[in-house]
Amino acid sequence: MPGQPGDRLLHAALVLFAIGVVAIVTMFAYPALADGDRAPIGVYLLTLGTPIGFVLAIVFALRSGRRQR
C-alpha cells in the first residue's frame, strides 16, 4: 500500500544509510586521493548516517510488523 505514513520512515532510513555508506567510502578513499591528508570533519559527521539509518530501519520493521497483526 503506497502512501502510508510509515513509508516515509523507511525512505528516510534508506537515504541516511546510503549517505553514511558513501561517507565511509569517501573517508577511506580521501587520503589516497589527497596525498595523505585526512578527510574533512563533515565527512566524519556524515558517517553517522549509517547507524542512524539502521536504527530507523529497525524501528520501521518493528512498527510495520505490529500493524500486520
Image (cartoon, grey):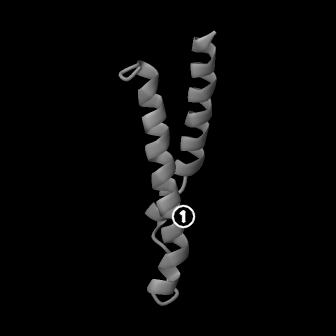
Q: Position of residue 30 (x, y in %)?
A: 48, 78
Quadrant of the snapshot with the N terminus:
top left
In the image shown, does 50 or 35 lie closer to the viewer? 50
| Identity of the residue drawn at 59% across and 20% down | 63
Q: Is residue 57 above or below residue 44?
A: above
Q: Position of residue 66 (x, y in %)?
A: 63, 14
The residue pinned by badge 1 equals 24
Q: Is residue 50 above or below residue 35?
A: above
| Identity of the residue drawn at 48% across and 70% down | 26
Q: Secondary structure at mark 1?
A: helix
Residue at the far front: name it: 1
Residue count near mark 1 (Cα–Cα under 10 Å), binned few <14, some 14–19, many ≥20 = some
Quadrant of the snapshot with the C terminus:
top right
> Which amino acid type is marked by label 1?
Ile
| Identity of the residue drawn at 38% across and 23% down | 2
In the image shown, does 39 or 12 lie closer to the viewer? 12
Q: Position of residue 43 (x, y in %)?
A: 47, 63
